Amino acid sequence: MLKYPELPLHNNASELEVRQRVRKRDVSFGPRTEDGVHAWDTFATLAETAKKLGVSFYRYLHDRISDDNQIPPLADLIMKHAKDLDLGWSFSSTPNY
């Protein structure tokens, strides 16, 4: 019996995401400074999170920069999405083993 059955049995999605980052780094020769590394990683993470939540990354950035705040924070969307999918149910339940 799986301890956390709602988690995928493989990490192929994570591996593919890392591959995309490495290919971009190879093509552009990567960021030049530590601040560049941090900015690149931050924006890549935001873009991928927005994509997974079905939110346009460019609309999200515009919403935040313009201070319109029409799009909820990504953290709120993640919590709603996880609740809709009932993720984490096995973490809060009593183990049956």
Image: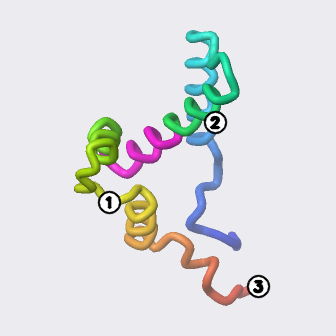
Circle 1 packing at 10 Å, graded few (<14), some (14-19), many (20+), is few
Mark sitting on residue 72: 1
Residue 89 image position (x, y, % from top left): 55, 78
> Is the residue marked by circle 3 packed among few (<14), some (14-19), or many (20+) residues within 10 Å?
few
Tell me the mark number nearer the camera, choosing from 3 and 2. 2
Where does label 3 land, which residue? 97
Kind of residue at disc 1? Pro
Q: Residue at x 59, y 27 (%)?
A: 21
Query: Is residue 31 in sight in this rendering?
Result: yes
Q: Is residue 91 above or below residue 36?
A: below
Q: Tell me the CA gap for discs 3 and 2.
A: 31 Å
Whether residue 79 sits left or right of residue 70 in the image: it is right
**Residue placed under numbered mark 2 in the picture:** 15
| Quadrant that contains the N terminus | bottom right
Marks 2 and 1, how far apart at CA? 29 Å
Q: Is residue 74 left or right of residue 18?
A: left
Determine the main secondary structure of the stretch shown in magenta: helix
* Mark 1: secondary structure: loop
Q: Quadrant of residue 23?
A: top right
Q: Is residue 3 left or right of residue 41?
A: right
Q: CA distance from mark 3 to mark 1?
A: 40 Å
First in sequence: mark 2 or mark 1? 2
Pick out the residue farthest to the right. 97
User: Is residue 2 or residue 48 the one in the foreground?
Assistant: 48
Q: In the picture, residue 39 is in which quadrant?
A: top right
Q: Is residue 37 magenta?
A: no
Query: Where residue 11 sits in the image (x, y, percent)?
Result: 64, 45
Q: Residue at x 61, y 18 (%)?
A: 25
Mark 2 is surrounded, within 10 Å at the Cα level, by few (under 14), some (14 to 19) or many (20 or more) other residues, namely few
Q: Residue at x 38, y 42 (%)?
A: 51
Residue 53 part of the magenta segment: yes
